[in-house]
Amino acid sequence: MIAVAPRVTAAPRTPAEKRRRWIVALIAVLGLAAVLAAQLVPVRHRVEADLTQRSAEALTAAAQPVSRLSFRGRDALVVTASDADAARAREVVGAVDGVRVVRTRVVAVAPVLSPPTVLVSATAGTAALTGSVPTTAIRSALHDAVTTVFGPDSVDDRITVADTVAGDPALTALPALLRAVPREATGLSVRLAGGAVTLTGVAPAETARTTLARAVRTSGLTVDDRVTVAALQPQIDEIPALTFRTGSATLTGESRAALRRVAALLEANPSAAIRIAGHTDSSGSRATNLYMSRARADAVRTALRDQDVAADRLTVVGYGEAHPVAPNDTPAHRAMNRRVELTVTSTTPR
């Protein structure tokens, strides 16, 4: 008789045991995935970096511009600015060893515009116009404004028109300012850059400076106004020496013409006043010389008054022989001492 061992039946698993087994299996799978990722991700990054570098070098060697180059695995994405660039980039990158697929995307790139520049440089009654503006209409307006002041034959116009130059509201207001520029200014410069205007130079007279300053105020422009006014005394000193008929206080015709120039300078510089000082040589008595020096200074004042110069702008003094500029030892030296000096004495605004 054969004995049969009894069958051992495993106890059924409880729900808690089933959950534990499922969690253990899930952890094992996730751990394996993490190990694989830790090994594969660095490899993928190295592949992408290598392909990116070699593709960029190939594009550079082919002088092919791109906006962006990236890889996902062995698949490239090239962003270009035109269809022609995209086609050429696909060809260049596709030839790189290891590249699988080349996708392209065309993104139009707005041109980078440069700000307009204008420079007017003037001296000795001539002007040079240089810079870059966006339209021919603006160029013509600037040209016309400068030639209005200096004349068409005295302007060297080298300004250019380019579609890479941006518009600027300052360009619309600039011509009116240029028309206020004094033609006789010394070393004048009007520069537009970055939307702001810089003025430098020397205006020939106060009235010209006032006209320019008024144009600056009404232009609406941002202006750094550094223009100064020419000193009046050197201009007075350029007037020929005043002469009189022999032994009298009567001005010669040449001197009356010279005083008309003095009157014009005073009219253009309304804040200025002058001192008229008469001098003689040592011939004759001191009293006679003093009288003659004063009489000649008075004659000069009268001539200027006849030219509508206000009396309160004219101071008269006679020094006689007291202040010689040369020894009274020769006819030439004595002639130098017989003089009337005009000296600017006030620059107080009137």
Image (cartoon, rainbow, N blue to C red):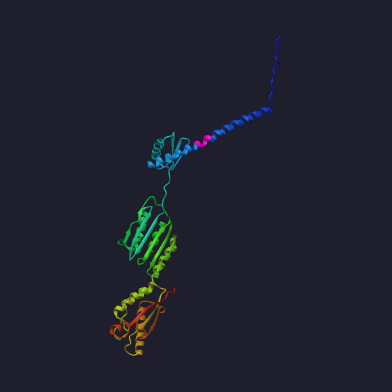
Residue 36, picture quadrant: top right
Residue 332 coordinates in the image, percent (x, y): 28, 83
Looking at the image, can residue 118 be seen?
Answer: yes
Residue at the top extreme, as displayed: 1
The stretch in magenta equals: 39-43
Q: Quadrant of the C terminus?
A: bottom left
In the image, 194 versus 175, the foreground residue is: 194
Question: Does the magenta-highlighted stretch encompass residue 40?
Answer: yes
Q: Main secondary structure of the magenta part?
A: helix
- Of residues 248 and 187, the one nearer the viewer is 187
- Whether 183 is drawn above or below 256: the answer is above
Position of 107 relative to 193 (above/below): above
In this rendering, the count of numbered labels is 0
Q: Quadrant of residue 245?
A: bottom left
Quadrant where the N terminus sits is top right
Q: Is residue 298 at least partly visible in the picture?
A: no
